[in-house]
Amino acid sequence: SQSHHLIRLCFSPSNVVPMPSRRRKSGAWRFSTALFLLSASCAAGAQLRAGSRRADPPTEDEVGYLLDILKKFRSFAEESKVDLSEYEEAKKTQIQAAAATAQHEGAKQALLEASKDHEANMLAAGGIYDAMINFSEHVETLLEKTASQVSGCEKKECGRHATCSLTSKGAECVCDEGYVGHGLDCHAPYDFRPHPLVVGSKNLKAVDLHLTIFGNDRIAIVFREDSESSPGSLIVGRAKAGGLAAFAPPERFTADGEMAFAPVVEGLSADRAAIAWRNKWQNGDGFLRVATFGGTGIRGADTAITWGETVKFCQRQSHQMALVGLPEGRFAVLFASPSEEETTSGQVLGTVGLKSLIATAPTTPVGGQALIATSAGDGSLTLSGTFRFTDTPVCRLEVAKLSPTSFVIAARSSPVQDKENKARDIHQEAMAILGDFVDEELAFAPTVLNLEPNEGEIWARGVSRIDNQTFAYAYQDGGKSEIKQAIVHVHTPTKAMKVLSRDQVLRRGLSSYVNMISMPELTFSPHTMAMFEDTASNVSFVEICSWSTTGSSLQDCEAFPWLNEAPATQIAAGALPGGRFVVGFTARSGQPFYTIFSVARK
């Protein structure tokens, strides 16, 4: 082949034709130059072959040196070819002139034959120079690709969701896994991008979103319509393949003229969910209602809703409640327990953007209560007991199940006096409380955990399960403008809680929400998943950390943007089977959306 011929040429200096130079360089000098450059070119090939076999790629200096030698080699061949052409023309003219003046016919024929032989030799020599030029250009191209691979990624700037990769074309920006597009403009596939929660109704504005996953792939989302009448609505659907879900139109769970503030929803079985809400922003009554899906018996109508009766279960509510499912159609409602004393003004404890937390307006909540409710097949409810889980005022209630019968409550509470140092108050704004369902009753651990005993201004929070004895607690430290995460272990016999990891800062700054999602153990090794907003960039992130059970430490934390097109003001999220997660959220415009994203092991 030609490549083999050129390699052999490198080791055959006798094939180089030294010609007189128009720059008056001697033939011996040109021969030495050719021999040196050819030897250097062969060394370049040897280094390339060696570099392909060694573990480390050639350095930028090495590649640059080889490129310089090859360019000189090509330049020598090009100059030599020009000189050869000039020499050929001069020699041809000389022979033709001698043939024209030859007196003897035999001498004339000999000169003409010599001219033909000379022309053939020159063509052969020119072919050698052409081959040298082609060889140089071919190797230079390979070296330039190698150079782009060596230094290209260091100098390459890729767009969001893209990474520089070494390809056969050199260094190129390639979209990260899970994104499509070009290296400078990568985005989630259409199926995984945000979709309107209610199709064809852009005028619908939603606030107070809450979401639950039940029956494997069913999704229920409740919200309050942001209108003068403020009714409550439920949307139910099923997750489909990829990043889509099929939702039925919204259906109101409140009667005409009734309002629904801070509704929450919890799946009870594969075809049933419970909803709790209050009917006023402040000092409202608390209500419960159960929705049964697909109870009509009509094929294909599995999203049809049969409503149970609306049950009033408490009064003077001004804060969000929480629901947690229990075995056999039971569930617990967690809410603030107010006193009989009323006040006329509220105390603002913390503000993030336009959202504020009112601690006492117009009632002072004293303690926290839990109510057990049982749902029958027809949606009717039986209330079977009320239990107190704390004697101090609570708000910002969140809950996560640790097992079918145990759960942890995250709450914000007022300070208490330190029993060992009565001159000191213990802050309870990042409180954790354990609960158990035992013998048809609720039991709560007598000792609570305070993650920030010396700090106030703890705002949004979320809590999630890692395993039956471990949970994660993320929260917004408003005083320090930090979003933090802690890991807590539960000693099962005594119900004592021990902080294993504290004060991990997920992000600096403020977020209008902090949510946590319990990641299924069967799909993933122990991990935490926290969701928050970076208000500086208006990008919403999900941060995933690996939890080392042997080292009791968080490892390999990485934040991924899941929304950067329309900043979310409120979100609600849950885990679907197969490593997928669904998020319902409202944009700044108030329009509700949903998105589904997937998480996979690296």
Image: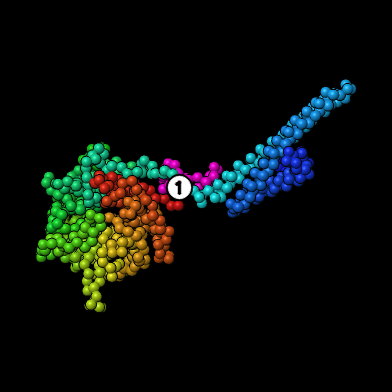
Instruction: Name which residue lies at 66% across and 47% down.
Output: 69
Magenta highlight range: 158-183
| Amino acid at the residue labelled 1 | Cys
| Rendered residue at 64%/42% (across/down) | 139
Q: Position of residue 460 (x, y in %)?
A: 27, 59
* Magenta span includes 91: no
As for residue 173 lying within the magenta part, the answer is yes
Identified at 35% across, 56% down, the residue is 529
Location of residue 392 with respect to 271 vertically, above or below: below
Q: Quadrant of residue 30?
A: top right
Q: Looking at the image, which is closer to me, 97 or 54?
A: 97
- Secondary structure, mark 1, is loop
Residue 347 or residue 105, whichever sits in front: 105
Front residue of 530/70: it is 70
The residue that disc 1 covers is 158
Is 556 left, or right, of 567 in this rendering? Answer: right
Give percent across and percent down for residue 359. Answer: 18, 62
Q: Quadrant of residue 371?
A: bottom left
Which residue is at 89% across, 22% downward? Answer: 104
Q: Mark 1 Cα within 10 Å, few/some/many (few <14, many 20+)?
A: some
Residue 184, x across and y down, in percent: 44, 44
